[in-house]
Image (tube, rainbow, N blue to C red):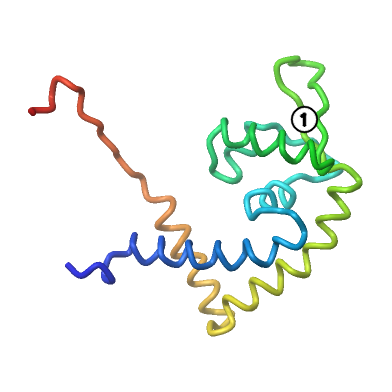
Amino acid sequence: MDLHDLTGYLIHRTDVKLTNYFTKKLKPYGVTPEQWSIISILDDQRGTTQKELVEAIDKNQTTIVRMVHSMEKKGLIKRIFNEQDRRSHYLFLTEKGAETKKTISPAVKDAHLFVTRQLSEEEIDQLKTLLNKVYNTPMLITIPYKDDISL
């Protein structure tokens, strides 16, 4: 089978190209695509937990913790302890974070329009549907025990 016939390769290749483009568009604002994901999810009216962020942007807990610390240092987000569970806290956009979201949103929209410019609205909807179908396909990954590996 040819490499360019493999769906996984095509998705990965496209992801790398789009991520590089998006990274360049966000660089003047000092925000990464992953940080933009967090900014776009956080609502300055309702707190979001780190666990909810893990699920929302599909990153592991360690990565989220690192990103939250970085964004907190930049003054984009703040943490408020959960009164019911002192081990967790809620994340909110700061005033600076909300302003950053407002400032960057047009650039994000322009980037989306640019990368999808060759697709009709119907094709964009189909693409979203198909990508979500592929993403939501159950994957069974089995890792052999060391005793099962023959050397």
Image quarter hosting the N terminus? bottom left
User: On screen, 120 above or below 131?
Assistant: below
Camera-side residue of 73 and 133: 73
Camera-side residue of 44 and 27: 27
User: On screen, 124 above or below 142?
Assistant: below
Check the image and name the residue furthest to the right: 95
Residue at (74, 36) in percent of width and height: 48
User: Horizontal placement of 137 versus 65: left or right?
Assistant: left
User: Horizontal placement of 36 versus 135: left or right?
Assistant: right
Image quarter hosting the C terminus? top left
Q: Position of residue 108 (x, y in %)?
A: 71, 66
**Within-10-Å neighbours for mark 1: few <14, some 14–19, many 20+:** some
User: Horizontal placement of 49 versus 121: left or right?
Assistant: right
Q: Position of residue 102 (x, y in %)?
A: 85, 60
For mark 1, what is the residue?
90
The quarter of the picture where residue 49 lies is top right
| Three-letter residue code for mark 1 | Tyr
Q: Position of residue 23 (x, y in %)?
A: 62, 61
User: On screen, 119 above or below 93?
Assistant: below
Residue at (28, 71) in percent of width and height: 4
The quarter of the picture where residue 71 lies is top right
Residue at (80, 45) in percent of width and height: 43
Camera-side residue of 70 and 1: 70
Helix, strand or loop for disc 1: strand
Instruction: Report the number of numbered marks.
Output: 1
Residue at (79, 21) in percent of width and height: 82
Camera-side residue of 120 and 103: 103
